[in-house]
Image (tube, rainbow, N blue to C red):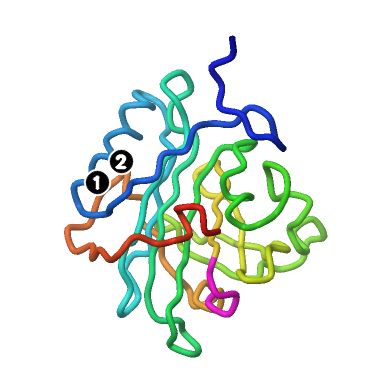
Amino acid sequence: MNSDWRCDIDGPVLPLYIAERINAQIVEAAVAKVRASHAGEATTPLWVLWPLPPGWMVTGVGLAGDCRSGVRATVLACSGPAPIDRGPADIVLVAEEPGVGLGARLAGIPGPDPGPFLEGAHDGAPAHAKVRAAGRPTPLWSVKSADDRSAYVGEAKGMWLYAIAWPASAGYLVAEDLSLCDLVEAVPSELVFGAPSPYLHGSA
């Protein structure tokens, strides 16, 4: 018998748990689970846009991993007005160890890691965007994602960092010198929550 979760395409995969609702207590529970699964070790970050851009809210959270391996990836969704047309927009932030594949799935690219799809990162080209992740300047490169979204990938705290935006034009927000806070280190009391994002519940 095999207790692994299995994908018809990729074989064994880690189970993914997405909260059905989102509020401060659910975020605190997710943070506690991350901390407990990495006792005494470096933890998987749980990134959030912070401060939140005007009109933006936290709209979802999820964890990938099991009781044997611990939390190997986190995902958090934020929603708000798009920077260009002011229509609705969503940004999903993923932190994951190499080989997990959650960020690649949400970006709409095959395989577990973004390496083959990073545009210019292997040629010494300048980064397409930069964010501040836990106070550190973090370069991000565009990846060839699905047509209805834009995706940027870099490394922060020794793990892949994905920023995936719907619609594709909302990726412009990533280029606006965003700051990211690791909720595992501290959860701001001023977080604002909204209706669950569809992009964490099978609509990606």
Label 1 sits on residue: 26
| Distance in Å between CA atoms under marks 1 and 2 | 6 Å
Q: Is residue 113 magenta?
A: no
> Going by the image, does 97 lie left or right of 194?
right
Farthest residue, direction top: 1
Residue located at (46% from left, 84% from top)? 83
x, y (%) of residue 73? 49, 40
x, y (%) of residue 164? 55, 63
Magenta stretch: give its range.
165-170
- 26 w.r.t. 10: above or below: below
Q: Is residue 169 magenta?
A: yes
Secondary structure beneath dot 1 equals helix
> Going by the image, does 67 lie left or right of 166?
left
Q: Are marks 1 and 2 in contact (CB under 8 Å)?
A: yes
Q: Residues within 10 Å of mark 1 (few under 14, many from 20)?
A: some
Camera-side residue of 108 and 184: 108
Label 2 sits on residue: 30
Q: What is the quadrant of the C terminus in the image? A: bottom right
Secondary structure beneath dot 2 equals helix
Residue located at (48% from left, 59% from top)? 199
Residue 113 figure quarter: top right
- 85 w.r.t. 6: above or below: below
Q: Amino acid at mark 2?
A: Ala
Q: What is the quadrant of the N terminus in the image? A: top right
